[in-house]
Image: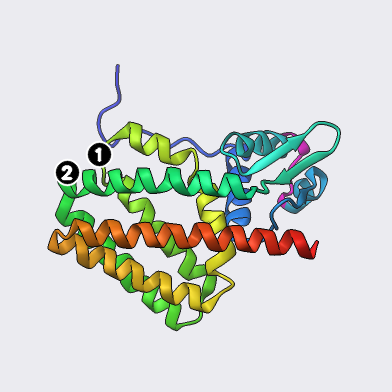
Amino acid sequence: MPAKPGMQIEQPKTLTKIVVERLREAIIDGQFAFGENISEDKLATAFGVSRSPVRDALNALQFIGLVTIKPKRGSFVFNPTAEEVAEICDYRLMLEREALRLAMESDRDDFLAALDDTVHRMRDRMLAGDEIGYVRIDTEFHNLFFDHCGNGLVQNAFHLVEARIATIRTALNARFKQRREDSFDQHVAIVEGLKRGDWAQVHDVLDKHITSIRTDAIDELSRTTADG
């Protein structure tokens, strides 16, 4: 007999899910560098759990591309090549353009209201000098395209790269003030274009936004490699 609405009991999260969420957040927030070794023992100690849920969490994060597990060597934060960054950005642009169209068709008013809210909060965090807070809301902004698009397949396609996109975004926007300011202006222009139905502006700004991330990320990875 199915439970009546409102009677379902929320299942507690497993240790593995808790470790996955916390480690995912730590990688996205830049607490680990690209290519950095992730020690199972240190994580187990830090989280106060055994190595088993840590190992399961690392396997789960490998599935979404945040972690690379190398047999007999250990687990490492993903370290994209220039070619991989280019592929991710091309994939992202294709998906975001389609998600924007679907969201405006299926949920225009609520979608625009949600975008306005994130832009206001991004401005507050930028003025407060809260780099990580700004980047987290930046991620929310783009995720809204998929939250409101009404197409599960498009959402699933985005989830394949969502965490890697957010990590790359943090590596750039959290470190460089000018990038955050340029990024903010582009978000505002996207929302203004959507409100006017000016798809030429929306596509142009979105293309420039993602292309600049692609270029800057490749440059930053090249610089880091050269320094190393």
Disc 2 element: helix
Residue 88 vs residue 122: left or right?
Answer: right
Residue 49 vs residue 23: left or right?
Answer: right
Confirm or deny contact between disc 1 and disc 2 (CB under 8 A): yes
- Of the 4 image quadrants, the one containing the N terminus is top left
Magenta extent: 47-52
Q: Position of residue 93 (x, y in %)?
A: 39, 48
Q: Nearer the viewer, residue 51 or 128?
A: 128
Q: Is 48 colored magenta in this rendering? A: yes
Query: What residue sits right under mark 2 in the picture?
Result: 106
Q: Amino acid at mark 1?
A: Gly
Q: In the image as oriented, which residue stretches furthest toward the right?
A: 72
Q: Which residue is pictured at 33% across the width and 45% down the height?
A: 146
Q: Position of residue 84 (x, y in %)?
A: 58, 44
Total numbered labels placed on residues in the image: 2
- Of the 4 image quadrants, the one containing the C terminus is bottom right
Q: Amino acid at mark 2?
A: Ser
Q: Nearer the viewer, residue 144 or 189?
A: 189
